[in-house]
Amino acid sequence: MTGTVAVLVASVAALNPSMVARRQYGRPIDRWITGVVIAAVAAAAVGALAEPIRDLLSVSEPTMRTAAGAVLALTGARWLVGPSPRPGDADPTVDATLSTFSPAVVLTAMATTAEDGWLVTVAGITLAVVITVGLCLTGHHGRVSTWAVRGFGALAVVAGLAMVVNGVEVV
């Protein structure tokens, strides 16, 4: 799974903007968006450090891509068949940061940076954040948002499996 479009798709799927926006519904939007932006910057920073982190762990690029794809596919499967997310009771900024800075997002950022470069990964993260903020501002909730969460989950399964296959083919 390489190329700009593949990175954009994987980044958006890893974040699942619909899931993050659904957890925000009815909570202070400014604090929620602050948390999403903090997490996005942190994910981009981890992506920038992908090579030194991989070297420290003695992990090859194909192995990182395979692992990231497996985590993304499993996360997507959970969104596809699991219960719909609901707003939590935690501080909105903390909740948004933790909802956005997930293992799927971090590992996808690291894997896509290794293959396609940091700027493409940042573009993917930025696109995911823009979609998330747009959904938050429109009051994303109800039956449509439930199916949107599942749709992004299906996209995550497909993107994750593509990453796994690509990682295994290279090895």
Image (spheres, rainbow, N blue to C red):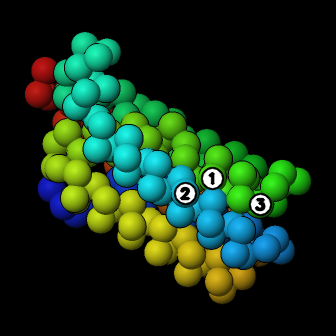
Say which label, 2 or 3, has the lower sequence index. 2
Instruction: Give the left or right position of residue 77, taking residue 144 as reference.
Output: left
Q: Is mark 1 on a helix, strand or loop?
A: helix
Q: Is residue 139 left or right of residue 114?
A: right
Q: Camera-side residue: 88 or 81?
A: 88
Label 2 vs 1, first from the N-terminus: 2
Residue at numbered disc 3: 92
Residue annotated with mark 2:
38
Callout 1 crowding tier (Cα within 10 Å): few <14, some 14–19, many ≥20:
many
The residue located at (44%, 41%) in the rendering is: 106
Amino acid type of the residue that numbered disc 1 sits on in the rendered structure: Thr
Residue positioned 51% across, 37% down in the render: 103
* Kind of residue at disc 2: Ile
Q: Mark 1 points at which residue?
A: 97
Q: In which quarter of the image is residue 12?
A: bottom left
Farthest-out residue, right: 89
Q: Position of residue 52 (x, y in %)?
A: 25, 27
Spatial separation of the CA atoms under disc 2 and disc 1? 6 Å
Q: Which of 66 and 96 is in front in this view?
A: 96
- Circle count: 3
Q: Which of 42 and 159 is in front in this view?
A: 42
